[in-house]
Amino acid sequence: MPRQLTTLTARGFEHYEVSNFARLREKVSGTESDARSASSACKSDSVPDTFSHRCRHNEVYWSGDEYYAAGPGASRYVAGVRETNHRSTTTYIKRVLAGQSPVAEREELNPEDRARELLVFGLRRLEGVDRTWFAARTGFDLDALIGEPLRRHVALGLLADDGRPHSPHPRRSLRQRRHLAKLTIGQ
C-alpha cells in the first residue's frame, strides 16, 4: 500500500475517490467520535455527508448533477448541455454588453454518451456505481450498456462487481485506471 494512502487513512482521512481524501468530522450527532472508526460508515451514499468534509463541488460532477456558472471561462452543465464562456475577460464583457451570448464552446451529449460519462465518473468513486441508481438516472441498464466489457475488466482484476461495479483496490495507479475509458466505450 502506498505510504500516502496509509498515512492519510491512519490520520483520519476518508479515501472516497480515486484522487481525493476527506477529513472525517470529529463530532457525530453532537458527541465526540473517533474519526477512524467512522470511516467505514462514510463510504455509503446512504450516510449523510455530515460525517466527512468531502468536496461537494466535485461530488456534483461525479454524480452527474447540473451546475451553473457565470463569468469569463466559466463552465456549466444544464439539461445535458455543457457550455463554457469565453476565457478572455475583454471578449466576455464585449459580448455581454452587445447582448450576445458569452458562450465560446458548447457540447450536447446524447443520452447514451451521458450515461457512459456518468459511469466513468461513478467508477472514480470508491463506493462504485449502484445499478438501480444508474438505471434511474440514465434510463440505461448498466449490464446492457457495458456488460461484456465489464465482465472482462472484472476477470482481469481491474474492477470488482459485488452488485456495485467498483475498483477492487483504492490504491490502483492512475495508469491502470485508463482502462475505465476503454470500459465505457465497449473495449
Image (cartoon, rainbow, N blue to C red):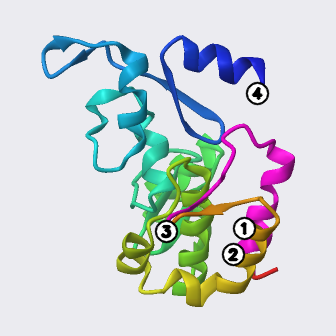
Residue 177 in the magenta stretch? The answer is yes
Callout 2, which amino acid?
Leu
* Residue at the image point whose x is 54% and y is 59% from the top: 122
Q: Earlier in the sequence, mark 2 or mark 4?
A: 4
- Which span of residues is magenta-colored? 164-185
Q: Is residue 89 above or below residue 78?
A: above
User: SS at mark 3?
Assistant: loop
Instruction: Give neighbour class at mark 4: few <14, some 14-19, many 20+ (Cα, 10 Å).
Output: few
Could you tell me how far apart the alpha carbons at marks 1 and 4 are, in whole angstroms?
21 Å
Query: Which label sits on residue 150?
Result: 2
Do tag 2 and tag 1 residues touch (Cβ < 8 Å)?
A: yes
Q: Earlier in the sequence, mark 3 or mark 2?
A: 2
Q: Earlier in the sequence, mark 1 or mark 3?
A: 1
Query: Which label sits on residue 1?
Result: 4
Callout 1, which amino acid?
Val
- Give the x, y percent position of residue 29: 14, 22
- Give the x, y percent position of residue 136: 35, 78
Q: Is residue 104 above or below residue 143?
A: above
Would residue 120 be found to the left or right of residue 59 on screen? right
